Amino acid sequence: MVNRVDPLTYLGEQVADWKAAGTYNRLRILEGPCASESRFDGHEVINLASNNYLGLTTHPKLIEAAIEATRKYGAGSGAVRTISGTMDLHMELERRIAQFKNVEACVVFQSGFAANAGTVAAVLTPDDYIISDELNHASIIDGCRLSKAKIRVFGHKDHNAAGRILAELDGVSGRKILITDGVFSMDGDIAPLPELAALAERHGAIMMVDDAHSSGVLGRNGRGTIDHFGLHGRVDIQVGTLSKAIGVLGGYVCGTKNLIEFLYQRARPFLFSTSHPPAVTAACLAAFDILENEPERIERLWENTRYFKAGLTDAGFDTGASETPITPVMVGEASQAHQFSRELFDNGLLATGIAFPTVAKDKARVRTIVSAAHTTSQLDRALDVFKRVGARMEIIRT
């Protein structure tokens, strides 16, 4: 055997630096279902770290649909969609989502990340322009870079700044696309969509919204921010996820038939990834049944959100600009945020420390997300843990 020096030693050195700085994020191992109270690393903890907004990961109807589809269709599709991997289940799911979102058509991707990155990269060229909120999700940012279009970034939720950029580009050759998250994943605030949509119309730009964290949360029966603001027909590209409130896996893009037919032909994640297993697709279909037939789940989600957020605020925690179930507890310094997360876990609560590069260096926080499945008793216990650990670590405002 050749005595070879590992050329990747430098990566281990970087990991060691993160550990020494207290910013290394160790993977927590889930040992059972994702629920409001779950078992991680051998400990039963209240789970405030998942995107399982409506508690659908364990809903009996989703589980039954997944089992039945596996029995009927098998474990996998065996190919990418464009070869032999398009099942009738996939087409049914796309039709169902399009109907739910009140658009002409829909295409399902293997993840929300793939939906965002693949779509932006497919519809733009180096001759085009992207006008993007500075806090847009990483998948949007990567799609922008892959497109090689010219990127102009505006301050977070600053629609006036976006308007100035669009005005500067009036008369400049190339297409323009205005992109924003509907709900921002780290701060839990909502984009000013009416103002942005009006700007896109005024300047002839394509309007694109990533509704990952608002699908199943905002709008009628969880139809998202476009429905929440009454903007149907004014947003050209809607991106959503099947991995959060829907409780399963995947992403999707909604829009005109022309858009979807184009993405079938040119979106690289769609073209080069095996399609969803039947179990995943069937479970997603069952989830949309629940969204339409059990609106009380969304009502419960918002009741829990208001209750928990008020408890944190009353205790003296800074919850930033949150307007949704995503509720950050602002800490500031990265190592302290990670230490706060570890101590919360040791006291029976899972809430993830988030720091640079995910957020700005001085904006480290512990992010919490309540779900419709949490009981008042669980939320009270969680608030008690936050108060005790926050006081000991001097994080609570005085």
Image (cartoon, rainbow, N blue to C red):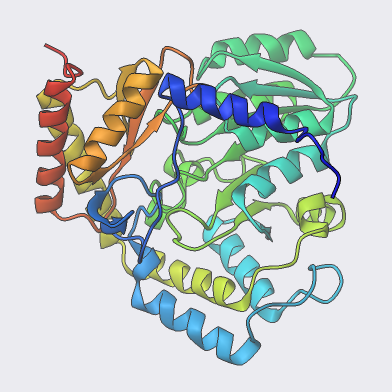
Q: Is residue 178 visible?
A: no
User: What x and y, as percent, mark residue 275?
Assistant: 71, 68
The one of 90 and 364 positioned closer to us in this rendering: 364
Q: How many marks?
A: 0
Residue shown at 15%/55% (left/top)?
Answer: 375
* 286 up-or-down from 99: above or below: below
Q: Is residue 362 visible?
A: yes
Residue shown at 65%/16% (left/top)?
Answer: 153
Q: Quadrant of residue 130?
A: top right
Is 38 on the left-hand or right-hand side of 141?
left
Residue shown at 63%/45% (left/top)?
Answer: 113
User: What x and y, as percent, mark residue 270?
Assistant: 77, 57
The one of 16 and 390 positioned closer to us in this rendering: 16
User: What x and y, as percent, mark residue 220?
Assistant: 39, 53
Is 196 on the left-hand or right-hand side of 387?
right
The one of 200 and 373 positioned closer to us in this rendering: 373
User: What x and y, as percent, mark residue 263?
Assistant: 80, 53
Residue shown at 36%/60% (left/top)?
Answer: 34
* 268 up-or-down from 151: above or below: below
Is 87 on the left-hand or right-hand side of 258?
left
* 192 up-or-down from 39: above or below: above
Q: Quadrant of residue 83?
A: bottom right
* 229 up-or-down from 92: above or below: above
The one of 171 and 321 positioned closer to us in this rendering: 321
